Amino acid sequence: MNSKDIWKDCFGFDFPSSSTVLNISNSSKEIKKNSVFFAVQGTKSHGCQFIHEAFTKGAAFVVTDKMPENINSENIFFVPDLEKKILNFLLQYYSIDITKIKFFGVTGTNGKTSVAYLCYQLYKKTGNPSAYMGTLGFISDGYQSIAKETTPDIFSLFKHLASLNKTEGLGLFLELSSHGLHQKRLSMLDYEKLCIANIGSDHLDYHQTQEDYERSKLSILDLNQRSIPLVNYDVLEVIKKHKIKDYEMQTFSDMQEKSDFLFRILPGEIDGYDVEINELEKSKSIKFNTNLFPKFNITNLCTAIMMLKNNLIKLNINKEIQNIALPKGRNTVFKSSSKHVIIDFAHNDAAMNNILASYKEKYKDVWVLFGCGGERDRSKRSRMYKTAQIYASKIFFTSDNSRNEDFVSIKKDALPSNLPEGTSIIEDREEAIESAVLSLPKDIPLLILGRGHEEFLDIKNKTIAHSDISSVKRFF
C-alpha cells in the first residue's frame, strides 16, 4: 500500500498533497518540521491543548479526536474513535507484521525488571530474536535506547520495533507498570503470556489509595492473552479482597505447597543454590544450580523460566542459565580485599527489606546508604528508614531525585526528630557515597540503594549526571 493511501484507509481522509511526513508522534515535545501530531488524551490533559505548539514547531498536520478551540486550520483532521484505529495505522505505517511477534507482559511492585530481563536472555537461547523494554530502556541485539518511562506508549513502542533488523519470531518482554496499566498504554496488544510477580505498595502519590494501586496492577488480568497468566500465590489474597471475577491462573511460590509451581531453593552442596521447580499437576520438576543472590533473585529467575516453559522444552536449563545475568544495578557487587559494596535499585521499604535481610543473614553487620524521592509517596519515607534501622548499624541518608521538593522536607518525613547516633545525613549523594565507602570497615558490606542502573538525578528541575555505579567504581 502506498504510504499516502494509509491515511485514507485507516482514518478516512486524503493525505494532504502539499505535506511531507518524516515523523509521527503523540507527544508535542517530539514534534519537528514535517511531523504529524496525534492529539489524543494524555495522562493529565488532552493533546488538543498542544496543537498550536505542534504547528509552531513545524507539524505538517494534526490528527485528533477532539477539535481545539480558537484554532482553525485545514490541516487539522478530526477522526472519531481515533484511539481504536491507531494500532492498525502503526502496523501499516511501519510495515510490521504483528502476527510474527510474541508480546509478554510482567508487572509487580518489585522484581518486574529482573523477571522481564531474565526472560529476554532466556528467549534468546531458543535461537529466536528477543527484546526487552522497561526501566532499563529498549534492549535487543544491535539496538538499544534509553527509557523515558517504564511502560512506553504505543507510538514509542512501534518506533523501537521499526528500528530492529528482524521482527519475525521476536519475543518482546515488556514491563507493565501500575501507571501504564492504569492509563491503558498498551492495552490494545494481544499478549502471549502475562505475569504478576507480586503486589505490595508503591506510587501512592499517583494512585492516591492502596486500593487503586492494587486494582491497576490486577487489571493486567483483563488484557488479551493466548495462555493462562502466571501469578504469585500471595496475590490471590489481593484478588479475593477486591472481589473481582474468577480468572484462570497458574500460581507460583517459594513457600506455598498448593501453588501450581513450587520453587525449592536450598544452599548448594558445592556452591551457589540448588533449585528445583516442581509442577503440581504433572509431577514434573526442573533442577538446576545457580550463583544468583539473594534468594529473591532466584525466585525471579524461576518465574522467568515458568513464563517461557513452553519455549524452553528443548534447552538444557542447568547449562543455559549459567551465563544468565541480573540487570545492571540489581545486586551489582564490587569487592576487593578491603571493601565490599553492593548497588541495588531497591526503592521502597519492601524491596529494602528483601535485600537487607538477605545480606544480614549472610554477614554479622551491614551498612546502608539510601534516600527518598521528592514529590512522590511521602508515606513510605519513614517506613524505609525504619527498615534500614532493623538491619544496619550505620545509615547514610542522602538525596534521591528530590525533584522540586526541598531535601529538608524529605528528611523531616523520613527521619525521627531525635536522630540515632548511627545515622549520618549527607545531602549530596556523591559526597555521601565517598564518605560511606572510605569509612567502611573491611568485613562489613555497604548497600547503596535506590538508584541502581540510573545515571541522572532530578534536583530542583535540573538533570544532574550521577551514577552510583560510576561513583563506586573509582574505589575499586
Image (cartoon, grey):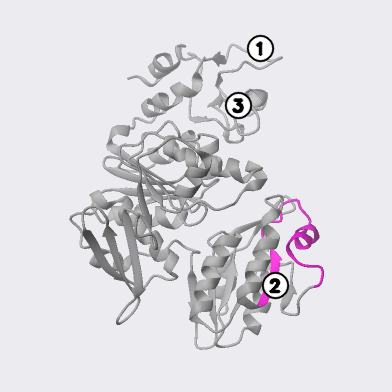
Q: Which of the two labelled residues, at mark 2 and mark 3, occupies the earlier sequence position?
A: 3
Q: In the drawing, does residue 357 fall left or right of residue 426? A: left
Q: Which residue is mark 1?
A: 72
The CA span between labels 1 and 2 is 55 Å
Tell me, yes or no, whether the two marked residues, 2 and 3, touch with CB atoms within 8 Å. Answer: no
Q: Which mark is residue 431?
A: 2
Asked if the magenta segment contains residue 416, the reply would be: yes
The answer to whether residue 158 is visible is no
Q: In the drawing, does residue 46 fall left or right of residue 93? A: right
Mark 2 belongs to which amino acid?
Glu
Q: In the drawing, does residue 258 fall left or right of residue 420? A: left
Q: Secondary structure at mark 1?
A: loop
| Residue 192 percent coordinates (x, y) | 32, 40
Q: In the drawing, does residue 297 fall left or right of residue 274? A: right
Where does the magenta region start and end? 394-418
Q: Which of the two labelled residues, at mark 1 and mark 2, occupies the earlier sequence position?
A: 1
* Badge 1: residue crowd in 10 Å (few <14, some 14–19, many ≥20): few
45 or 182, nearer to the observer: 182
114 or 17, nearer to the observer: 114
Q: Which residue is mark 3?
A: 58
Mark 3 belongs to which amino acid?
Gly
Q: Which of the two labelled residues, at mark 3 and mark 1, occupies the earlier sequence position?
A: 3
Task: Name the residue located 45 percent from the left edge and 25 percent from the top edge.
Answer: 86
Please say if 365 is above or below 77. Answer: below
